[in-house]
Amino acid sequence: AQSVTQLDSQVPVFEEAPVELRCNYSSSVSVYLFWYVQYPNQGLQLLLKYLSGSTLVKGINGFEAEFNKSQTSFHLRKPSVHISDTAEYFCAVSQGYSTLTFGKGTMLLVSP
Amino acid sequence: GAGVSQSPRYKVAKRGQDVALRCDPISGHVSLFWYQQALGQGPEFLTYFQNEAQLDKSGLPSDRFFAERPEGSVSTLKIQRTQQEDSAVYLCASSLARDSPLHFGNGTRLTVT
């Protein structure tokens, strides 16, 4: 079985400040890791994914994440956020691309 | 091309009614998934199709939930005798193959009163 823990349900931040959204996972086998973003009343959009190789993964909209196997973490970062980054962010794990197990989500609130 | 399309976007049902939620995947996508997203929660897996075959239905919460994809394209998720705890957003996702990236629809928000 696998699970995902997103430690913060809500993260408030000012525009142009850096942000880190935390994600920890547990699994007995090797996994793929994902971050998705969900804007209000919309579906999920893939931000980035880690399958193998370099532990630093770059995604869309200036986001990046670092896979840390020893700490079983996959934290999402952005050096300077915009108002438009306000959304719900979900960390997810799978043994392939399919049948994702999601965390409960972190609401990123960017204010001017 | 068009993305994954779900209809209706919103559905209000009285407790005890049956509902049917439709998903039109991206043309040519073999794999199709249904997820349930309760308020304030992450999506949870319901069921998976490869073409018309339902290969995994382990996430369906009860026998009131039924999904089909008879011709390997459009899928319908049916909920019989809806209960208040069924209120959620139902997300459909499709992919070209089993190990390809998922494309999500905008979901159907079901409210059971």
Image (tube, rainbow, N blue to C red):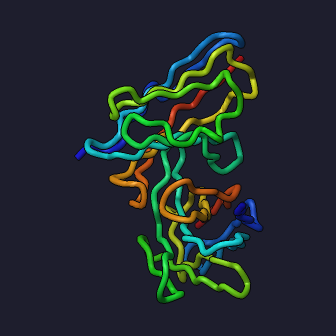
**Residue at the image position 72 percent from the left and 72 percent from the top:** A24
Q: Residue at x 71, y 88 (%)?
A: A70
Q: Is residue B71 above or below residue A35?
A: above
Q: Quadrant of the C terminus of chain B?
A: top right
* Above-or-below relation of B17 to B59: above
Locate residue A50, reporting x and y percent: 50, 76
In the foreground, A91 or B69: B69
At x 56%, y 42%, the residue is B56
In terms of image quadrants, where is residue B2? Answer: top left
B60 sits to left or right of B71: right
Task: Tell which of A107 and A58 is nearer to you.
Answer: A58
| Visible residue check, residue A25 | no
Q: Is residue A43 above or below residue B11?
A: below
Q: Give how far across and how far down residue A48 sits, in percent.
A: 47, 71
Q: Is residue B98 above or below residue A75?
A: above
- How many numbered circles are shown? 0
Indicate left or right for A47 with A22 as reference: left
Q: Is residue A46 visible?
A: yes
Closest to the observer: A47 or B43? B43
* Residue at x 54%, y 67% (from the top left corner): A34
Task: Pinpoint residue B46: horizontal percent, then vertical percent.
Answer: 60, 40
Measuring from the top left, give residue B27's x and y in whole percent. 26, 41
Q: Quadrant of residue A92?
A: bottom right
* Residue located farthest toward the left when viewing the structure as drawn: B1
